Amino acid sequence: MGVSKKKENLISSSSSDPLQWQKIFNALVQMLKSQQSQLQTLADDRKLLEDRIQTQHQRWLFDVRLLEDQISQLQDSCKEAELGRLLEEAKSNLVVGMKQREAFLYKSISEQSASDLEDMKQVIDYLNSNLSEQRDKPEEKTRGTGKSNAKTVVNMKEEEKRSKTLRDEIRRLKYSNEKLSSQRNSEVSALVAERNFVWNQFKTMESDYTGLLKTKRVEVEQANENILKLQSIVEKLQSSCKEKDNIIVKLNADIAKLKMDMGTRDKEISRLSKEFDLLSSSAKASLKQAVTHPTSSNCSIKKASNVGREKRTPVRKEPSEPHASEGVSQTPAATRPILSSCSMKSTSNVGRGKRIVRKQTSESHASGLSMECKRSSKKQRTEAPSKLETPRLFTSGFKVPKLKISSPSLV
C-alpha cells in the first residue's frame, strides 16, 4: 500500500511539473506586459503634457503680442491726438492774434477818426466864429461909410458861398464820420462775436481732448495691468513647466530602472530556460541509461530519489555503473548553484517558483527512475518481454518560448 501511494504521488508531481512551469512563465509574461503598458502610458502622458504646455505657451505669447500691438496703437493714437490738439491750439492762437491785431487796427482807425472829427469840429467852430464876426463888421461899415457898400456886398456874397461850401463839407464829413463809426462799431461787434465763438470752440475742443486723454490713460493703465497679469501667468506656467520637466526626468529615471529590471529578468528567464533544457536533457539521458541498463541501475535510482527528497546531498558514484551514477548526480550539482543565484537576484515570487521547480524536478527524476526500476524488476520476475514506456515531462517538439520585449520609444 505504501509503495502504491508513493507511486501515485510521484506520478502526480511529474504531471503537475509542466503546469507549474507554465504558470510561472505566464506570470512573468503578464508582469512584463504590465510594465510595458505602464511605460507606454507614461510616454503618452508625457507627450500629451508637452503638447498641451506648448500650445498654451504659444497662445499666451500670441495674447501678449496682441496686447503689445494694442498698446502701441493706443500710444500712437494718443500722440496723434496730442499733436492734433497742439495744432488746433496753435490755429486758434493764430486766429485770435489776427483778430486782436485787426481789432487794434480798427481801434486805432477809430481813434484817428475821432481826433479828425474833433479837429473838424474845431475848424467848423472857428469858421462859424469868423463868419459871425465878418457879418457884424460889414453892417458897421455900411453904417459908418456909404462908399464901400458895393465892396461889402460882393464880399458878403463870397463869404456866403464860402460858408455854404464849408457847411456842405461839414455835413459830408459828419456823414462820413457817422458812417465810419457805424462800420467800426459793426466790425468791433463782429470781432467780439467771432472771438467769443473761437474761444468757446477752443474750450470745447480742450474739454474733448482732456476727456480723450483721460480715457486713453485709463486704457493704457488697463493694458499695463493685463500685461502684468499675463507676465505673472507666464511665470507661473514656466514654474509649472519646470516642475513637470522634473517629473518627466524622474519618470525617465524610473523607466531606465524598469528597463534594467526587464533586462535582468530577461537574462534570468533565458538562464532558467537553459537550465530547464539541461535538466530535461539530463533526465532524458538518465531515462535512456535506465532503459538500457534496467537491472544494474536499481541502487543508483534509489539514491537519486533520496537525493531528490533531501535536496542537499549529491548522489555517490557506483564503481560498477559509472554512466548511470553520473547522469543522476549531474542534476543536483547543476541545480544547487543555479537556484541559489536565482534566489539572490530575483524577487520573492520568482524565488518561490524556482523552489517549487527544484522540488518538482527532483521528484520527477525520482519518480521516473523508481517506475523504471519497478518495471524492470517485474520483467525479470515474469521473464515476459514487454516494451517499456518512458515517462516524458514534455513532448519531443516542446521548446521554452523566449519573450521578446519591445522597449517603448519615448518622445
Image: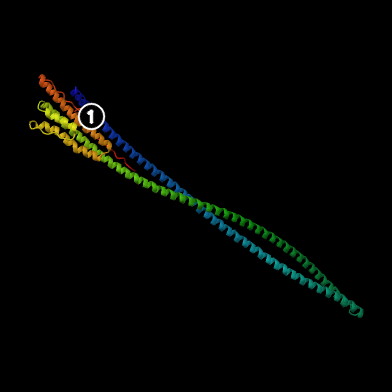
Residue sitting farthest toward the front: 2
In the image, taking residue 130 as reference, residue 45 lies left or right, namely left
* 57 to the left or right of 169: left
Tell me residue 281's x, y (percent): 16, 32
Quarter that holds the C terminus? top left
Q: Residue at x 74, y 71 (%)?
A: 115
Left/right placement of residue 342 relative to residue 376 reads: right
Q: Quadrant of residue 254?
A: top left
Task: Determine the image quadrant of residue 33.
Answer: top left
- Determine the image quadrant of residue 45: top left
| Residue 353 vertical placement versus 85 (above, below) | above
Please tell me which residue lies in front, 362 or 137: 362
For badge 1, the amino acid type reads Asp
Question: In this rendering, would 299 be left or right of 236?
Answer: left
Give the residue number, with chain letter if any, for mark 1.
17
Regarding residue 401, the answer to whether it shows in the image is: no
How many tags in the picture? Answer: 1
The foreground one among 88 and 12 is 12
Give 210 or 183, whichever is nearer the viewer.
Answer: 210
Q: Is residue 242 visible?
A: yes
Residue 175 vertical position relative to residue 408 in the rendered view, above or below: below
Q: Position of residue 395 (x, y in %)?
A: 20, 27
- At label 1, counting other C-alpha atoms closer than 10 Å, the crowd grade (few under 14, some 14-19, many 20 or more) is many
**Residue sitting at x 65%, y 59%:** 199
Label 1 secondary element: helix
Between 362 and 155, the one nearer to me in the picture: 362
Q: Quadrant of the N terminus?
A: top left
Location of residue 94 in the rendering, given as x and y in whole percent from the top left corner? 62, 62
